[in-house]
Image: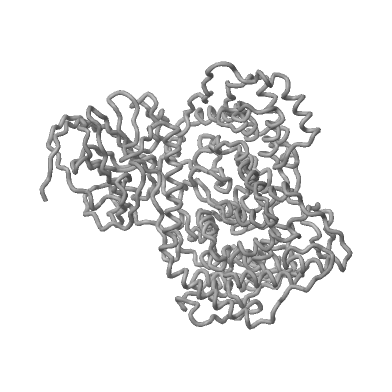
Amino acid sequence: MRRSFLPLAILFFSSSACWLATAALARDAFAEQQAASQDRVLVEIFEGLPNKASWDFSLPESTDRYDTAAFGFVEVPHKYTPHGVRADRSEPFLIRATAQVTVPEGKWRILVRCRNASRLYLDDVQIAETPFHSIAASGHDRVRELDASLGPNIRPLRRGDSQRVCDIVGDGRSHAFRLEMIVGGRDRRPELGETSVSIGPPEGDFQLLGPVIQVPLTDAPWREYAAEQRRELAAWNQRRRREASVAEAEYWVWRHDLARRQLADLPPNLPPAYEGPLPVQNEIDRFLNVRIEAADTKLTPRTEDWQFLRRATLDILGTIPTSDQVEQFFADASPDRRARWIERLLAADGWADNWVGYWQDVLAENPNIVNPTLNNTGPFRWWIHESFLDNKPFDRFATELVQMEGSTYFGGPAGFALATENDVPMAAKAHIVGQAFLGLEMKCARCHDAPYHDFKQRDLFSLAAMFKRDVQAVPKTSTIPGGEDAVKSLLVAVTLKPGEKVAPQWSFAALVPDEVPEGVLRDPQDSRERAAALITSARNERFAHVIVNRLWRRYLGRGLVEPVDDWEHARPSHPELLDHLARELVTSGYDLKHVARLILNSHAYQRMPRGEDVLEPGQPYLFAAPIRRRLAAEQLVDSLFLAAGKPLDAGPMCVDIDGARPAKLSLNLGEPTRAWQFASLSNERDRPSLALPFTQPFVTLMEAFGWRSSRQDPRTVRADEATPLQPAVMANGSLTGRIVRLSDDSVWTSLALHDLSLDELTRQIFVRLLTREPQSAERQVFRELLGPGYAERRVVGDVPRTARAPLRRGVVAWSNHLDPEASVVQAELELAVLQGDPPTSRLQSDWRERMEDMIWTLVNSPEMVFVP
């Protein structure tokens, strides 16, 4: 093939030398490697590289490819197993990004930034190189300021990344750029940091190199670009999961057909033919009304539209409605707009976000961001989220959890298998699975036969052995202190001795016999797969009953069976309704949204709530009204920030931001965008230098409202009693200060600057925070508060936005936390958090503070924290 040549003058700077090279550079034909669209960057991934700090290897065949907008990278697509769960790529792996880019005439600087080793090629000639990652994990490195020397407004170089600059002379023609970078390896997390190739003039700022888009390499544009790339990759990952698991999906279609056939053998369970005066919106109401009418119990009235809108949006998406959602709901004049709204919400991604926190509690997801402690797991939160995002059939969800495959430290269900510092981790997992899916509370059986449950130690350990795929030895810790004499004086019996080995076998024949239909097991010798098949079998009625009961309690405030996770003495308040919903789950293909739709559309759900004082001990609750519920901690945080229009800005959930430590010692959980993404901030010595000041206010508020930062054991129902700490942290906490502050990134500031009447401003604030319009008395109160000076509230002139003074965020990591300066930096950041977001200068300060008082009042009202 004939090549054309382009003379370019290239000035290349390395860490040790620079030289001027003038050469005739070959322009190779990259057409076969380019993405389908010429305005994108083609990215290829190569696995199977030698695990060493060297470029001395032959490049294997690529295993993956995708495209992106520019030479800026924060993540790559995930790899998925044939079951559709996250898997680890072999480490290290190489990323090659290529694109044709027109270089304008004149002199230009090219800037390369990368977390690990990289090489940049221009028309097939190397022009820049970054070194292999070499930061030590001892903790004794120095605290250094982030490097922002290459441009007046440049985004500083992140700690852990390295950079190189070279000069080129452009000719106004298109050239082939190729970046090759090595990711991970040598026991480091496979992270990209903020990898980029940028172009800029000899003096001035850079912008990302790309075929079309122009993104300045400054703070705000980079954050927007990174967020958009993550959104693109999330959609890409969802497609990849479907593509990787086509055969798996077909298997589950067959499993669900089998389940329907098994269910068809049972006698029908039809709703009663209720014809009485009580309202009926679907079959759920028919089941309930028969009992309610017989007891002569009075129903509470149906919620008003505003109340329904807030409740349904919270229950499905986990957030209060936005102003746009309010407008959309009331713009629908159809008589079935509530049902249509439920459908709209069920189709939204927030369905997944709202379920993650619940299953983190139930399944004891317990990652620790620094150094393992008791019963830490991997962060399988991402698998939970992707499962609900894909509306995965719930029997498949339970099966994948029990199979514990995929990635351990980066989001796969294999993370569930971990139970650090636990000498019999599979016994812990058997306890969690039994409680979550079967309502079996076997915690006591870890050490002795359960005194108040019909479980023996062997029941727990035989299930643990099935999960282990081998015999399970009873550890020395599974004893009662004091020996046999102590046991004789207690109500418990110890029937397994330390060191005794228990074989893998199914011990719960009372729920379902140890019989699996032909074709269900892909590997008949796999005891873990067999356990999953028996747990999720359609003949195991307990599984479907437990799951629909969990949904019922989540939406109605009380289960048809209580407690929902311990069915030893189960007495369903409405057994026929429970069985009906369970059959609906099975016949729908274990579709949780189907059962949720039935519950949410019922009159029972849409009635006004009552307090728990209506519950009578020992008496079944008839559900004449839902039980009043408080917002979950995650819902409260997400709703407050959604209403204020502010990003969480909590910083990364990681103390090893420069990637010096292995994943088994330090996790990187990313920067939270929803409250379920937080985790424990504890470190083994409570070192101030390892604090996360911008994250701490979130954890403080959520813990006050029942969230657990550490989940060493499973829990279904959080502590929901009122405490003095809750109003204290809502009234005085740093997080509330951020919400009410009229800063230049706040919706409240934008509303105040608009040409709105005072009554309309008040109305919009009420709608955003409380999902209702203000009453006449409330309007008057806020007229008196905000009326004085309202016409003059805006500062005259072209007033710039107020920016926070530069902070030393991102300079402290595990690698330098023993430097005394690290604690000084953290103290500075904590002070900045306490001071809060800087207020806008575009509003008169006296009037602004009065409006902040108004918002504080609404945020601290009971309406803010209770589901209507």
Q: In this orientation, which residue lies closer to the viewer: 183 or 760? A: 760
- Number of numbered labels in the structure image: 0
Give me the residue at 59% from left, 62% from top: 477
Residue 145, compared with residue 228, is above or below; it is above
Q: In this orientation, which residue lies closer to the viewer: 423 or 852? A: 852
- Quadrant assignment, res 284: bottom right
Of all residues, the one furthest to the left in this rendering is 2
According to the image, what is the colour scheme of the structure?
one colour
Residue 504 in the image, given as x and y percentages of width and height: 53, 75
Answer left or right for 468 relative to 867: left
Of all residues, the one furthest to the right in this rendering is 296
Of all residues, the one furthest to the front in this rendering is 333
Q: Is residue 683 visible?
A: yes
Q: Is residue 426 visible?
A: no
Residue 61, compared with residue 450, is above or below; it is above
Residue 180 in the image, given as x and y percentages of width and height: 27, 46
Answer left or right for 697 relative to 867: left
Residue 512 in the image, given as x and y percentages of width and height: 62, 78
Of all residues, the one furthest to the top in this rendering is 797
Q: In this orientation, which residue lies closer to the viewer: 631 or 602? A: 602
Answer left or right for 625 relative to 341: right
Answer left or right for 555 relative to 383: right
Residue 629 in the image, given as x and y percentages of width and height: 73, 51
- Quadrant assignment, res 149: top left
